[in-house]
Amino acid sequence: MNELQNCPTCGSTQLQPFYAVTDVPVHSVLMLTTREQALSYPTGDIHLSVCQACGFITNTTFDGSKQEYSIPYEGTQSYSPTFNAFHKRLAEGIIERYDLHNKEIIEIGCGQGEFLVLLCELGQNQGIGFDPAFDNRRPDGYQSDRVTFISDFYSEEYTRYHADFVCCKMTLEHISDTAEFVHRVRRSIGDRLETTVFFQVPNARYVLNDVAFWDVYYEHCSYFDANSLTCLFERCGFQVLDTHTEYDDQYLVIEAKPVVGRITKPHFSPDAVADLLAEVEQFRIRSSAQLAHWDQLLATWASAGKRVVIWGGGSKGVSFLTALKHNRAIQYAVDINPNKHGTYMAGTGHEIVGPAVLASYQPNIIIVMNPIYC
């Protein structure tokens, strides 16, 4: 396919390439039931470019037709007590800030609906969640008669649904045409100017500063820092109320309200783009060394007969394994989500097992894919 030429966020033609990886699985959290299926899973290429006008980062070779957000898509993190505690704090804070009591809430890309259930139960609200992979597959304690789910993408036909609060968590990074998507949300709100929108995405600064190649995967075609996210929402007719990070700076949050006409208090700073571009350049320089470092570690451990596993059978784990030449030094991916046990990692075919397996396997080294879980 032809590479993207214009920035999907601001329309600029100033896209500068800085990182590429080829033949990566086009999905990393589909439940694949055989090793053969995992090894033969379709692949694509990642060519990351940064917009020198707004700081937005995109995969210019992304092909949305390869995506399969269906029932086997298993992205929930709600089997983790650490994540659940974060989710509850986040919901409580939102309810308090925006007085979400007895209100109508929409969540776009709701997954299995855990966060929407929290918002509705804690605030006595009513909710509608949209997600093509929804099939009511979630842990006990996340049921609610306050919530209605629609197992579909949030398309133009659903802009007829209205709410006091619109939530979209960890979805915008999967959208290649970012401006069109946020414009759709703005069209759905119309003249209901008291509606609040809340979006959460991965924090690009966190990825860049850590040279976290394991956080770059095919599904994520769009990467934001606070400034480029602000640019997107201001261009799409929103007044930005706040941007901040959550979850040890791994997630970036934006809160905004719709406006009619000109933004009275713009927050996007063209000057701030230079700082992001400097971090991108450091990522470009350091990424090869980071990959070589991990390959050398794995080769050394394999030579020494060490038993090695990774903790985390999700997207980070798939990206980590597929990027490294010596990934066979790793025997298992361990995950606490029971739905994943006995399935296989896309691209490399590593089996995903539960933590109980470690008692018998007795690994020498466990690579924790997200430091927050330590």
Image (tube, helix red, strand yellow):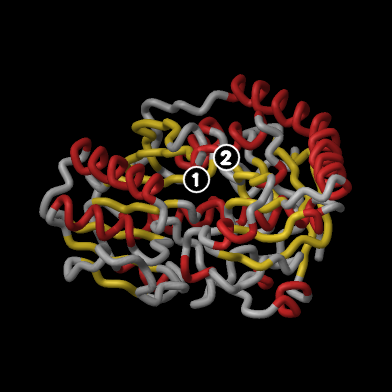
Q: Is residue 282 visible?
A: yes
How many numbered marks does the figure carry? 2
Q: Residue at x 75, y 79 (%)?
A: 36
Q: CA distance from mark 2 to mark 1?
A: 8 Å
Name the residue: 77% across, 61% down: 24
Circle 2: residue type: Phe
Where residue 11 appears, as percent x and y from the top left, is 64, 45
Q: Is residue 222 above or below residue 335?
A: above
Nearest the viewer among 171 and 154 is 171
Q: Check disc 1: other Cα within 10 Å, few if <14, some if 14-19, many if 20+.
A: many
Q: Is residue 82 left or right of residue 99?
A: right
Instruction: Tell me the residue at 46%/73% (across/down).
Output: 132
**Along the viewing direction, whichever of 295 and 143 lies nearer the viewer:** 295
Label 2 secondary element? loop
Along the viewing direction, whichever of 299 and 171 lies nearer the viewer: 299
- Indicate the quadrant where residue 332 lies: bottom right
Q: Earlier in the sequence, mark 2 or mark 1?
A: 1
Graded by Cα atoms within 10 Å as few (under 14), some (14 to 19) or many (20 or more), the crowding at tag 2 reads many
From this view, report whether residue 63 is shown above or below residue 56. Answer: below
Label 2–label 1 contact, CB within 8 A: yes
Could you say where residue 58 lies in the image, as x and y percent from the top left? 68, 47
Foreground residue, 210 or 240?
A: 210
Residue 280, above or below 34:
above
Q: Quadrant of residue 44?
A: bottom right
| Helix, strand or loop status at disc 1 | strand
Q: Position of residue 42 (x, y in %)?
A: 75, 73
The residue labelled by disc 2 is: 224
The quadrant of the picture occupied by the N terminus is bottom right
Q: Amino acid at mark 1?
A: Val
Measuring 79% from the left and 41% from the top, which residue is drawn there? 294
Q: Where does label 1 land, which residue? A: 201
